[in-house]
Image: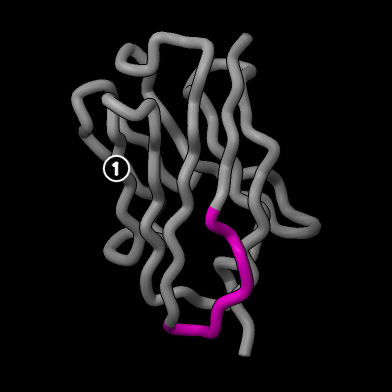
Amino acid sequence: QVQLVESGGGLVQPGGSLRLACAVSGTIFITKTMAWYRQAPGNQRAMVSFISTKSNPWYADSVKGRFTISRDNAKNMVYLQMNSLKPDDTAVYYCRIQNSNNWGQGTQVTVSS
């Protein structure tokens, strides 16, 4: 059974940082492209970043230069380091095995003063 469990969300002031983590089990992690999505109230879920099996990253324009995705294949973990956070980054963040129906439960990120 494939499981994805996110952690690391919370409340942060504008300009602050958070690191999200996603623990993956029940699959051969090293063969999977991993992605982070986010969904703000009233908006569709949108891809923020993904990292290929060769650790090549992609970022949405809205987060480029502020967010960094990484993976640890030895620990079956994927991370999203978020810096210079803005109120517009407020959303529920989801981890996903790309091109699959395997999603985590989501973690809330709120950027507010």
Answer with left or right where residue 27 lies relative to residue 94: left
Q: Is residue 24 depicted above or below 51 in this figure? A: above
Q: Residue at x 49, y 33 (%)?
A: 23
Q: Residues within 10 Å of mark 1 (few under 14, many from 20)?
A: some
Residue lying at the far front in this picture: please name it: 75
The image position of residue 6, as x and y in percent, is: 57, 42
Question: Residue at 35% of width from left, 48% of height from top?
Answer: 59
Q: Which corner quadrant of the image does residue 82 belong to?
A: bottom left
Q: Which residue is located at x 46 percent, y 46 percent?
A: 21
Give how far across and how far down residue 66 sits, in percent: 33, 66
Q: Is residue 17 above or below residue 95?
A: below
Q: Amino acid at mark 1?
A: Ser
Name the outermost residue toward the bottom: 113
Is 98 positioned to the left or the right of 65 in the image?
right
Q: Quadrant of residue 84?
A: bottom left
Residue 45 painted magenta:
no
Instruction: Give the total number of marks visible in the rendering.
Output: 1
How far from the left and from the top, in percent, is residue 81?
37, 58
- Name the quadrant of the C terminus: bottom right
Q: Where does label 1 land, which residue? A: 70
The quadrant the N terminus occupies is: top right
Name the magenta segment's main secondary structure: loop
Q: For this rendering, which residue is in front, 7 or 82?
A: 7
Bounds of the magenta span? 8-15
User: In this orientation, which residue lies closer to the viewer: 23 or 70?
Assistant: 23
User: Where on the picture, by quarter, is residue 62?
Assistant: bottom left
Which secondary structure lies at badge 1? strand
Front one among 14 and 29? 29
Q: How is the image coloured?
A: one colour
Taking the spot 33% from the left edge, 12% from the top edge, the residue there is 31
